[in-house]
Image (spheres, grey):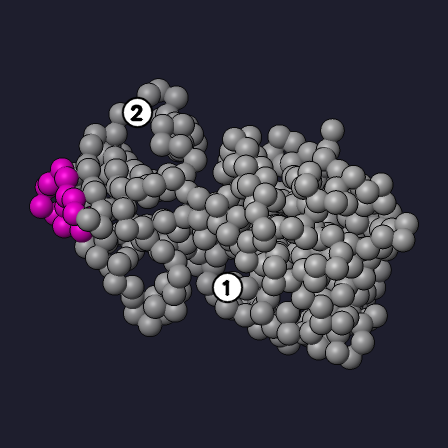
Amino acid sequence: MNALSGLPSDAGLTPFLKVIGQKRWAARMAEIRGGCVPGHAGRALARHHAVELTLDRLLRGVKTPGAGAESLLADLARALGQLAATLSPDGYARLQARLEQALSGAGTLVPLLHTMRCAEYQRERGFEVSFAGLERGAAYDLLLQRDGREMEVICETISAEEGRDVHRNAWSYLVDRVDPALQEWLTAHPGRYLLKMTLPQGLKYEGLRQEMAQGGNAALAALQQRITRLLSESRRADHDEAAVLRLEPLLLAGAQATELGLMRGLRQEFGHEAHLAVTAAGSGVFVMAARAAREDEVAEAMHRRMAMIAPARLTGTRPGILAMFIEDTDQLEWRVLREQLRLEGAARQFLTRAEARHVVAVTCVSRLELLGATPPNAAAGGELRFRSPGHPDAKAPALAPAIAAFT
């Protein structure tokens, strides 16, 4: 048995745990588990740290039979541990700095594992891969070599929350705060209700975690008070520049009698961008459905990030790839972003800009690809890929395995 992890010595995760440090890992996992309390916010935190929680289960020898995602995560964690053993002292120090970010605050291991996955994919395509960002302090992350040609890769992670006016984490906090009052109100007013909310000024999670730890958040508290006041005063509507609230009867079809059927019906009615929550008390059901005043702009947020990082992180002496990881999306949203060509439109528009002159291709992935999901839930080939037709190396045979469009 392995003294560090309690796993059999051939499990292969010892180097991963060693580079992180057993005490640091144990402290981080205690922090995460401490936040995964019952309620919407606790479940949201568990989803955010699903990678860490999964790896911790593997380190403790708890494995789900046949779970392909666990195997893929274990492979990436092993690769990270093996990489650490090959780095120079300066490279190891840079890795430790990135691990400190990943294991602090709202950080996760996803950005590092995204880099490891990009490196493995390019090796499978016949490229020699070096971790130039860690080894030499390069602004880009990976240097690819094949048939005498070189290419730089930036492995960037962006949260889909950057394109939302109403953040999912903020919504989770709101639901938890309102839920006790809703249950009490439902007990006194049994029935089925739907509260529609439009939030023109949004509801942001930025800074909310710290503010909540210190006792609250003004915008969140104000919206909570408006909801409870609407109910206590038996009103049907309330509106100002910050929020529009409308209380209506909830009409349920027969297929929506179960909780699963209800959520499916609500999602069909309100769309993938709506924030939904259901509170039940006895025979009473209370649904809250919230939207921002404008459509989410996840693809536009990615466009802005690419325009910022390409000039700053590519040297301009070699063609570059922007490997974008879109974090904090769910299966439905990721499918809509792909099928409605929103990410493709943003990428192709970016590739026409001056900031993209050194970019030969843009790729996009989410956690679904990281965890091995297959079409239609994930992108074919493991990533979305968009080649820049105007780049002088767009048709270079040596680079084709990394930049050619999938057929």
Question: For residue 57, what is the image quadrant?
Answer: bottom right
Q: Position of residue 159 (x, y in %)?
A: 51, 53
Label whose residue precedes the other's in the sequence (2 or 1): 1
Quadrant for the N terminus in the image = bottom right
Answer above or below: position of 290 versus 11: above
What residue is drawn where x is 71% and y is 77%?
Answer: 93
Residue 105 horizontal side relative to residue 53, left or right: left
Please give the residue where the numbered disc 1 appears in the rendered image: 106
Relative to the observer, which residue lies in front, 172 or 273?
273
Q: Position of residue 343 (x, y in %)?
A: 55, 39
Q: Is residue 75 visible?
A: no
The alpha-carbon separation of the residues under discs 2 and 1 comes to 38 Å
For the view shown, which residue lies furthest in the left direction?
A: 233
- Check if residue 160 falls in the magenta segment: no
Relative to the observer, which residue lies in front, 173 or 90?
90
Q: Is residue 106 visible?
A: yes
- Estimate how packed mark 2 is, as few (under 14), some (14 to 19) or many (20 or more) residues with alpha carbons within 10 Å: some
What residue is drawn where x is 30% and y is 24%?
Answer: 252
Which-is-in-front pick, marks 2 and 1? 1
Secondary structure of the residue carrying tag 1 is loop
Question: For residue 402, what is the image quadrant?
Answer: top right
The segment highlighted magenta reads: 226-240
Question: For residue 294, what is the image quadrant?
Answer: top left
What residue is drawn where x is 71% and y is 68%?
Answer: 138
Q: Amino acid at mark 2?
A: Leu
Relative to the observer, which residue lies in front, 208 or 129?
129
Residue 15 horizontal side relative to residue 251, left or right: right
Q: Position of residue 160 (x, y in %)?
A: 49, 49
Q: Amino acid at mark 1?
A: Ala
Please give the residue where the numbered disc 2 appears in the rendered image: 252
